[in-house]
Image (tube, coloured by chain):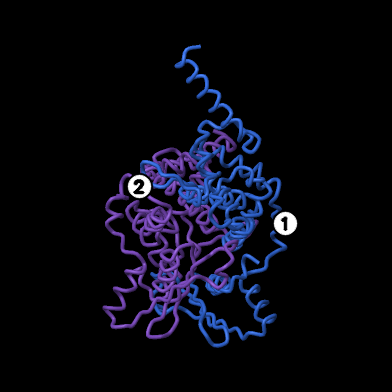
Chain colours: A purple, B blue
Amino acid sequence: MNWALRLITNRFRLSKSKSSHYDALLGFNPGKPDLYEIAFRHSSASIKGPLGRINNQRLEFLGDAILGAVVSDHIYRAMPSKNEGYLTQMRSKIVSRKSLNDLGHKLDLSRYIETNSKKPRPGEAIFGDALEALIGAIYIDKGYEYAQQFIMEKLIKNYIDLDELDQLTISYKSKLLEWSQKNKKEIRLDTQLSLNEGNSRKKPNFICSIFIDAIKVADGAGKSKKTAEEKASHIACTYLNLLNA
Amino acid sequence: MNWALRLITNRFRLSKSKSSHYDALLGFNPGKPDLYEIAFRHSSASIKGPLGRINNQRLEFLGDAILGAVVSDHIYRAMPSKNEGYLTQMRSKIVSRKSLNDLGHKLDLSRYIETNSKKPRPGEAIFGDALEALIGAIYIDKGYEYAQQFIMEKLIKNYIDLDELDQLTISYKSKLLEWSQKNKKEIRLDTQLSLNEGNSRKKPNFICSIFIDAIKVADGAGKSKKTAEEKASHIACTYLNLLNA
């Protein structure tokens, strides 16, 4: 075999093995294996490319939006009698940081993720981030329908039970109140129509302020009292680090 | 013509006129015209259905997510050298309440929207909401690619100029500082590593608190100092009603 032919054969073999590396995970043969390598490249292991640092963060941005669309479609169809407030809450639960990290674990993504071993070991979020980036890669490689099928078959059908999630309707407000009782903190939610009360041309209409031991820790705004309170409670929960627990 | 045939003919004529009613707006002939009627039904004009009140809010929930996916795809591809922070900021600008209301106006959606004239006239948000619901309806009626084509052809190509938006990089923080100078308020941003500093397994890492005249009005959390400050500033801007101005 002359060198040129050998080179071509090697490249082909290499690209074939790269590509089949992801087959079991994806359930299909990827068209652009390099894209999946990027999806699994944590920022600690960034490499320099002609347009800047290459890692999975741009694909994570994209995959997050694609996941949001597919999950919204799923719950919109699965729950025809539920209003948009309920659907929003349900979507938040499915795409929460904790839920995505868990799903990343279940898919055994650690087998694929590349990090820099000389830097501090990254936290759990690495799994959720890689999962989002993977979804972004599938979308770019194969289009929306493949991404949707992957999300439905590999994630939702296997691991997401809407009825179970429905039971688990601990709202952010409940979570916060629970914490305050446990930790003997005084919590006050002050919810009012927003300043521009008379002006219905502007959103939002309700503002909720949350005070812990008389110190304001969060504000939230929304079209309904409930939405405003949930938004403010979400911020307060984030502030108190209650969501990753 | 006997009554049964007349009934069928009338139904056919009615459904044909309903369907062609939307042709010019959509650029295609809708398969499920009833869905578009729902997309244009403001909550003030809700009707009672077997599964609850029928209005455009559920479709708005769905369309918001589809729009997010299509816009993310567009800027991901159009800006290959920009990082995820920049892309996120760009997406926020395109899908901001104000931007969607403007686009709804430009598409002349008021011709289609149904409200209850006995109730107070709804605000500008009605246009953005109807636009999102319309995108949700296209998605359910015809699928992702039609929704994507509608968004690209009717909205992005006609009205969204990424270079122009890039110039318009007034961040929420800048907006807030500008407001404070104009209104002679003292603003302080207090940004710190979050409580679980040593624990890299948890997100977020930075917390920003914003004080106006020494009163805390907002908190924000994020992976970077800049993200935390922008998130907190966004909440503060919402609180101060600076975003609809």
Label disc, if present, on residue B163 of the rendered structure: 1
Residue A60 visible to the viewer: yes
- Residue at the spot 50% in from the left edge and 24% down from the top edge: B11
Instruction: Give left or right: position of B50 versus B163.
Output: left
Query: What amino acid type is highlighted by mark number 2?
Result: Ile
Outermost residue, front side: B118
The answer to whether dots 2 and 1 both sit on one chain is: no
Relative height, residue B89 to residue B109 (above, below)? below
Residue B91 visible to the viewer: no
Q: Nearer the viewer, residue A233 or B200?
A: A233
Q: Nearer the viewer, residue A174 or A120?
A: A174
Outermost residue, top side: B1
Q: Local crowd at mark 2 within 10 Å, few (<14), some, or many (≥20)? A: some
Q: Nearer the viewer, residue A154 or B33?
A: B33
Label disc, if present, on residue B92 of the rendered structure: none
- Residue at the spot 42% in from the left edge and 49% down from the top edge: A71
CB under 8 Å between discs 2 and 1: no
x, y percent for residue A98: 36, 62
Q: Nearer the viewer, residue B190 or B16?
A: B16
Which secondary structure, mark 1?
A: helix
The CA distance from mark 2 to mark 1 is 38 Å
Query: What amino acid type is highlighted by mark number 1?
Result: Asp
Q: Which residue is mark 2?
A: A156
x, y percent for residue B173: 61, 74
Relative height, residue B93 to residue A236 (above, below)? above
The answer for which chain carries disc 2 is A
Q: Quadrant of residue B13?
A: top right
